[in-house]
Image: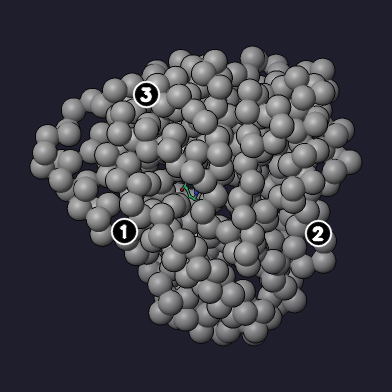
Amino acid sequence: LVARMRPFTSTIFAEMSALAVQHDAINLGQGFPDTDGPASMLQAAVGAINGGDNQYPPGIGVPALRHAIADHEREQYGIDLDPDSQVLVTVGATEAISGALLGLVEPGREVVMIEPYYDSYAACVALAGGVRKTVPLVSDGDGFVLDRDALSAAFGPNTAAVLVNSPHNPTGTVLGDDDLVEIARLATEHDVVVITDEVYEHLLFDGRTQQPIATLPGMAERTLRISSAAKTFNCTGWKVGWVTGPAELVAAARAAKQFLSYVGSGPFQPAVAHALRTEMAWARDNARDLERKRTVLSDALRSAGFGVHRSEAGYFVCADPRPLGFTDGAAFCRELPATIGVAAVPVSAFVDDTATWQHLVRFAFCKRDEVIAEAAARLRTLT
Ligand code: PMP
Ligand code: GLN
């Protein structure tokens, strides 16, 4: 194995999901919902398969989906895009991230990212031969905020791009408007590309709303915005994602993408197009449901004795098991499936600074109520 990939031989999700299966544990580790997306979307996929949509789709994605994405961007955020040159359909957000980084980062150049970072960011920067520069989230009491001093210190003459994930995985943090303005200011000052991973854009809680950096003044021309049907419509296995932005940057991502997968998810693309056009109300109801599940699992963790951090969006809540006597989150997560039949993921898998994040554990709440209730009962046996 080549040196640059040696730190990335397995993913924490595969490891913890395997432990969950081995011990028949409730899997609150890997973030995937255990209910299906809107029925009309599932029907549309069946229709597409039966209707013969089973060969290679166009390299940039089927026209129906590219048009639906462009309309979604305009209706939700007032972003105007040409569906033929400014929208690229990818094999999940994962390939949008790898395509963008491989297409835009020269070897040796730096990519600024928030720490903790989603695991594929580090691996894809390494694949590109780039160098990651991390900016930590810091505690604001019960939640997390961006360390602004570290943010400005991370930018320099060698910066190629800043990769921003909000809503954030693993913490469920939504960056403040002032953070976005500061990132935009620094990106402009240093003339770098902004890549935003907004896969949880429709899963915000407590009245929060998504503000894409691409909508800030002067940012549309330097921002690639990434999202995915996986989270908006509960179809993580379909692997339909996309990246939008200025034609030149989308073309860079496309150049890499065409040799990663060429194309993917043929019959699922028209189904996602259908969902974007007709099922946004389903997505809003789903977000309210997740908000409630967030509260239920956070309360359950608190009453089981964990310190619980504020989750503002997405699928995850981070908890601190030190009050229960566990100081090492990774060791705790390796034991948990066998001891009480619950799987979680250590936040240390998403960081460079393991000392600071060593204790923290991520739990997914995108599960049926009875599953969360059973997990809560098992977690209470820890005290
Ligand atoms: N980015 C983030 C922040 C994620 O949490 C995930 C998956 N949970 C992805 C990207 C990957 O998305 P996809 O499954 O569409 O490839
Ligand atoms: N993104 C999901 C998570 O954070 C899992 C995706 C994966 O398994 N790579 O849990």
Q: Nearest the camera: 340 or 163?
A: 163
Q: Amino acid at mark 3?
A: Ile
Residue count near mark 1 (Cα–Cα under 10 Å), binned few <14, some 14–19, many ≥20: some
- Counting residues from the start of the chain, the first of labels 3 and 2 encountered is 3
* Count of residue discs: 3
Reply above or below: 190 against 337.
above
What residue does disc 3 label? 60
- Counting residues from the start of the chain, the first of labels 1 and 2 encountered is 1
Going 47% across and 70% down the picture, which residue do you hit? 289
- Counting residues from the start of the chain, the first of labels 1 and 3 encountered is 1
Going 63% across and 28% down the picture, which residue do you hit? 220
Reply above or below: 171 against 251.
below
Q: Nearest the camera: 93 or 130?
A: 93
Q: Nearer the viewer, mark 1 or mark 2?
A: 1
Q: Nearest the camera: 20 or 87?
A: 87
Residue 48: horizontal and vertical position, in percent?
17, 41
Q: CA distance from mark 3 to mark 2?
A: 41 Å
Left or right relative to 89: residue 44: left
Residue count near mark 3 (Cα–Cα under 10 Å), binned few <14, some 14–19, many ≥20: many
Residue 131: horizontal and vertical position, in percent?
70, 25
Q: Is residue 150 visible?
A: yes
Q: Nearer the viewer, mark 3 or mark 2?
A: 3
What residue does disc 2 label? 139
What residue does disc 1 label? 38
Going 67% across and 56% down the picture, which residue do you hit? 173
Q: CA distance from mark 1 to mark 3?
A: 25 Å
Left or right relative to 50: residue 135: right
Q: CA distance from mark 1 to mark 2?
A: 37 Å
